[in-house]
Amino acid sequence: MPSNTLDRFRLTNRTALVTGARREIGRAIALALAGAGARLAIHHAGTAEEAADADAVVREIERDGGTARAFDQDFALDDAGHRLAAAVTAWSPVDILVLNASIELPEPYQAITRARFDRQISVNLRSPLELLQALVPPMGARGWGRVVTIGSVQQVRPHPQMMVYAGTKAAQLNWSWNLARQFGGQGVTVNNLAPGAILTARNRAQMATEGEALVQRIPTGRLGKPDDLVGAALLLCSDAGAYINGIDLYVDGGRAIA
């Protein structure tokens, strides 16, 4: 064991791919991992706005003495996960995979169309599965790896307007349990990190109308911020969390027990 316990959180010479890392939760986690010494692959979906945001994250990491590169890939497109895995691996073998990118298209379940269903499945499940297929076995072959899937309180508290999104998050949790069993003996841990009510650009309009009532059901008495996920993510991505495998870790201010 390192003489300094905090050394177990260091990620020197590790490479992390964080999907959807151009802002909010993904950005906060990417900056934290870079601060711990990891090289960062910053994924974004490829629009001009997203590319500019991702480049800004890369510059922030480089200003602090780190190494990072932006990679674009629209997860709604066929074979997107495999293409992203190939591009990042050509830059550096991936030791840490944080599956953060997802989309939610709120609507009544009777109104769900094939196109909107397929888009959420592609972004939230199919492309992440391709990344897992491409990147996890090499981690096992090297004897070290970390996978953190970013879940949601929707896994167990599905919003009536988010039937597809909530279902994809529940499926992702099941996958993390499955892979934790398969690869735990090869030095690879797979865990799910489930945020509660985190104030982000995606849900800002919803929180403006529902936030006050929601806060009353959160024991800590406030909505979460993206930075509230950082400590848990760093634990699960480092040697400090080497014996944590197959867990569903809520970062929700206690809402799950309220």
Image (cartoon, rainbow, N blue to C red):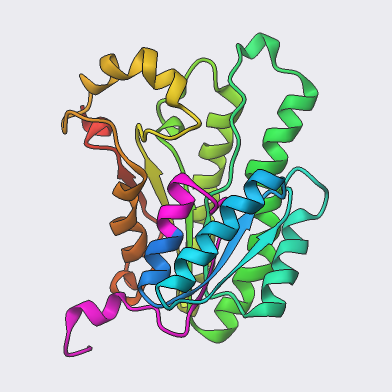
Give the residue displayed 62% in from the left and 52% down from the top: 52
Regarding residue 157, the answer to whether it shows in the image is yes
Task: Give the x, y percent position of residue 29.
Answer: 42, 57
In the displayed structure, does residue 230 sit left or right of residue 115? left
- Which quadrant would the C terminus be assigned to in this image? top left
State whether residue 149 is above or below residue 49: below
Task: Give the x, y percent position of residue 169.
Answer: 53, 38
In the displayed structure, does residue 256 sit left or right of residue 154? left
Q: Where is residue 76, by image quadrant?
A: top right
In the displayed structure, does residue 27 sit left or right of residue 69? left
Query: Quick one: 143 or 96, which is closer to the camera?
Result: 96
Q: Where is residue 84, by image quadrant?
A: bottom right
State whether residue 257 is above or below residue 86: above
Give the residue displayed 69% in from the left and 37% down from the top: 121
Query: Quick one: 28 or 143, which is closer to the camera?
Result: 28
State whether residue 3 is above or below residue 128: below
Give the residue displayed 53% in from the left and 30% down from the top: 166
- Which quadrant would the N terminus be assigned to in this image? bottom left
- Could you tell me how many numbered marks the image carries? 0
Give the residue displayed 20% in from the left and 19% down from the top: 216
Task: Give the x, y percent position of residue 118.
Answer: 75, 32
Residue with the most extreme right position: 78
Regarding residue 189, the answer to whether it shows in the image is no
Q: Is residue 122 magenta?
A: no
- Give the residues drawn in magenta, as a range: 1-29
Query: Quick one: 135 or 13, which is closer to the camera?
Result: 13
